[in-house]
Image: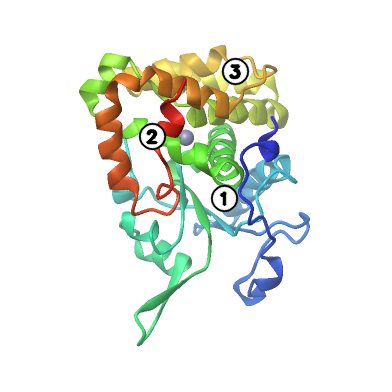
Amino acid sequence: MNMHGLVGFKNDTCFEEKHNCARGWAYTTIKHMCLMLDVKGRDAAVKEQRRTWATRVIQYFDGELPRLRLLIFLDETDVPTLKRSSDYRGFFHPIDKYHFNITLWPRVLAEALRTINQPAFESTYHYDALVYLPDSTCQAEASLTMTLAHELQHFIQYGFNRTVWAWNSIPTNLEQTTRASLRLQWQDIPVECEARIVAKRASQAILGHERTDEYIAFKTNEHVTDSDAADWEFIRGIDTSQPYDCTVKTRDLFQRLVPFRNELGQILDTAKGLPEFASLNLDDILQA
Ligand SMILES: [Zn+2]
């Protein structure tokens, strides 16, 4: 994987100096990282266990993460309003004045992510991005490891390959009937495919091949939904030794989407309120 050489996000500066250390920036032992790991819970032993598991994943990515301010939030509950689908296990979310307001945050997260400056009615945002894992994902090491690695790969995509990251979120908003006619699955979305490859590779490195295969088999047999079972079957078949070029695969995907140009245009128009989408032009990506 060589994300750093791809279409780049130029503002790759370390915010470390600007951080207010009183907020408890973590991981001074991991060089140049600008992230906070916040583990919630009342049981000290459980919290420590989860912190240890998460730290192993963060260390696996050492040197690969963008120098943006990231909050990794391991929750002690499953917040219903954050549940995006029946098979969801966590998410990555950019944080700024545009992205923050897309989601209805529980109070504990809203307060962690930003401070409202009275009486100016402006807010200070303490992070550039959030990785959130609900309690149910954090209960087992294999689940936490693979999910956190998956979401950290989205953070890497957002940090170093933001245009491609943005393009990838357009087809996921196609109408259900359009996605069905294209037989579009999660693994057809290149940033999602890459996150699955990297998550499996990380799990193999941290937990070993045997435990990784056991977890994938468990998730397949669990059969939360048909599409989730198919997704795990896809993950089972991934050869993590093979390279994957997210930029090339994104262009390939959009070639399949040429007949749906009007629908793509409507989705893009709606998304243009967000900074990553403002300069996107369909002609650039639909060209052969
Ligand atoms: Zn994903």
| Mark 3 neighbour density, 10 Å: few (under 14) some (14–19) many (20 or more) | some
Disc 2 residue crowd, few under 14, some 14–19, many 20+, Cα 10 Å: some
In the image, residue 154 above or below residue 11: above
Residue carrying label 2:
282
For the residues marked 2 and 3, what is the alpha-carbon distance in whole angstroms?
A: 40 Å
Q: Which residue is mark 3?
A: 213
Residue 107 image point, x, y percent: 36, 65
User: Circle 2 sits in a helix, a strand or a loop, which is it?
Assistant: helix
Residue name at image x 64 percent, y 29 percent: 203
Q: Image height check: is 121 above or below 281?
A: below
Residue at 59% over, 59% down: 69
Q: Earlier in the sequence, mark 2 or mark 3?
A: 3
Q: In this view, which residue lies farthest toward the left?
A: 177
Residue 182 point in image, percent of width and height: 31, 16
Q: CA distance from mark 1 to mark 2?
A: 48 Å
Left or right, 244 with respect to 98, comes to right
In front: mark 1 or mark 2? 2
- Up-down relation of residue 165 to residue 209 (above or below): below
User: Which residue is labeled 1 in the image?
Assistant: 46
Q: Amino acid at mark 1?
A: Val
Q: Residue 13's spot in the image, x, y percent? A: 68, 60
Comparing 122 with 262, the one in front is 262
Q: Residue at x 34, y 49 (%)?
A: 272
